[in-house]
Amino acid sequence: MAAGQGTGTAHHVVLVGGGHAHVQVMTDFAMRPESGVRLMLVTDRLTTPYSGMLPGHVAGFYDRDEMHIDLARLAHATGTSLVHAPATGVDRGSRQVLFADRPPLAYDTLSLDVGITPDVSAIAGADRNALLVKPISTFLERLEAAETEGIPRRIAIVGGGAAGVELACALRARFGTTPAIAILTAAPLVSTLNGGVRRRLEKALARLGIDVVRDFRAASLHGSRVTAADGQVHEAGLVLVSTAARAPGWLTATGLPTTPDGFLRIGPTLQVEGEEAIFAVGDCATRTDEPREKAGVFAVRQGPVLADNLLRKARGEPLRRHHAQRTFLVILSTGDGRAIAGKGRWLAVEGSWVWRWKDWIDRRFMARFSGA
């Protein structure tokens, strides 16, 4: 057992952020307790949303509790110590997590799973006038607040990726046929998915009466006017933005190596490059040797390897390599009791049975963290 620099000889593993990978570490450590290893979670929120169930929640299929993991309950059930406070930095020299209003917290091994924040720097006024999809927790609060003011006659979603398309369908289910809903996209709709999935999504959007405004690169948002770089204007009473994102700004101030867009650079063992004691996973990190798009499935798959490597690090054992899959299953809900699934270059299926399949996968994942 490697000696710790915290209290006594215990090895202190500190998790910052309650993301998809870290909740798996908590349950994994509880299933195979290690004498002398202490696990602690640092989080600014006591519940964490599961992104896979967000469209279903917006559409009304899940209540808030069904799509959130209760971190306090999970910590109690797994024997994880809990610090409810936002981390503001990392002192790598003294191996401490820093806070604005409490003393630093010592660690022997640190893991960061702090997600992403929206990057709307290319859309003037979006930070003040748009409903930003990330982070999910504040998005849900602001969506509910906007709904209390009345259902708008026109809704626009800026961003034609999978998240934007699913949310457009979910909003149709939530608000009914009353509002006009449009997706404003500069790139081809869901361009990362195969042709069969794209064709099915196009038909689903037409069936639901959702317009797609193409070649629309949003440049500014003032009041109800979304203006594109080429001068096109789209009017909407409610505008959601689901486009680019970046890592939390405080990560850059740590001095840890980052990509040009601010994401932590990690290698195959999930350690931050050049840092033996610091790991990073989920959307806040980028595998420089195997870069992948930002998707929750990768954080979910990183969880078991991260848990194993954190224990191996505490024991002084060689670490495992994580292999990021090149293709992965995507299931998109259309908000009407149906879903479209695809994988790789060819697989594309659709139907109510696909929605039931997605529902089963998501509920099974969430059941692991009920804290019972």
Image: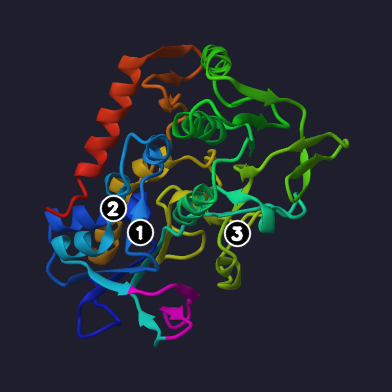
- Which residues are drawn in magenta? 84-101
In the rendered structure, which disc, 2 or 1, sits on the residue that comes first in sequence? 1
In the rendered structure, which disc, 2 or 3, sits on the residue that comes first in sequence? 2
Q: Position of residue 366 (x, y in %)?
A: 25, 43
CA separation, marks 3 and 1?
21 Å
Tell whether position 234 is magenta.
no
CA separation, marks 2 and 3?
29 Å
**Image marks 2 and 1: residues in contact by CB distance under 8 Å:** yes
Question: Is residue 240 left or right of 268 when viewed as pictured?
Answer: right
Query: The N terminus is located in which quarter?
Result: bottom left
Residue position marked by numbered label 1 in the rendering? 18
Q: How crowded is the residue under tag 1: few (<14 C-alpha within 10 Å), some, or many (20+)? A: many
The residue tagged with tag 2: helix, strand or loop? strand
What's under tag 1, amino acid-wise? Gly
Tell whether position 89 is magenta.
yes
**Image marks 2 and 3: residues in contact by CB distance under 8 Å:** no
Residue position marked by numbered label 2 in the rendering? 69
As drawn, which residue projects farthest toward the right?
A: 231
What's under tag 3, amino acid-wise? Thr
Q: Position of residue 38 (x, y in %)?
A: 21, 71
Location of residue 192 (image quadrant)? top right
The residue tagged with tag 1: helix, strand or loop? loop
Residue position marked by numbered label 3 in the rendering? 258
